[in-house]
Image: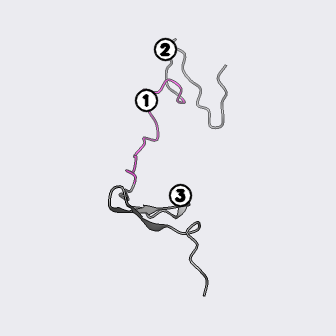
Amino acid sequence: MTQFNPVDHPHRRYNPLTGQWILVSPHRAKRPWQGAQETPAKQVLPAHDPDCFLCAGNVRVTGDKNPDYTGDLRFH
């Protein structure tokens, strides 16, 4: 049987100043999780945004129409 090593495992210690037992977690990754588990909201994005001045086929502020590019494009 192996001995308990407080450096490797979360454990409780008595705090004589407050009279309470406290949880000591030497390694952050081993701390017990007590928070909420929330699933992220699913974002529905449009395939084409008619108000985006960088999207293909839209008109820019200057009046120029963006080309119907299909690949990567670098703006100068």
Q: Is 18 located above or below residue 3 in the figure?
A: above
Give the mark nearest the N terminus, 1 or 2. 1
Kindly identify the amino acid type of the residue bearing the numbered disc 1: Pro
Look at mark 2 in the image and give the residue it sits on: 61
Kindly identify the amino acid type of the residue bearing the numbered disc 3: Arg
Who's the residue at 55% across and 69% down the image?
6
Question: Which numbered dot is residue 50?
Answer: 1
- Secondary structure at numbered mark 1: loop
Kindly identify the amino acid type of the residue bearing the numbered disc 2: Val
Counting other residues with Cα less than 10 Å from the Cα at mark 2, is it few (<14), some (14-19), or many (20 or more)? Answer: few
Question: Which numbered dot is residue 15?
Answer: none
Q: CA distance from mark 3 to mark 1?
A: 47 Å
Q: Is residue 43 magenta?
A: yes
Who's the residue at 42% across and 63% down the image?
23
- Secondary structure at numbered mark 3: helix
Q: CA distance from mark 3 to mark 2?
A: 51 Å
Residue closest to the eye, 72 or 14: 14
Q: Is 72 located above or below residue 24 in the figure?
A: above
Task: Estimate the x, y position of residue 70 in percent, counting from the top left.
Answer: 62, 37
Task: Estimate the x, y position of residue 47 in percent, counting from the top left.
Answer: 46, 41
Q: Residue furthest top?
A: 62
Q: Is residue 52 magenta?
A: yes
Q: In this rendering, would 22 be left or right of 63?
A: left
Counting other residues with Cα less than 10 Å from the Cα at mark 1, is it few (<14), some (14-19), or many (20 or more)? Answer: few
Look at mark 3 in the image and give the residue it sits on: 28
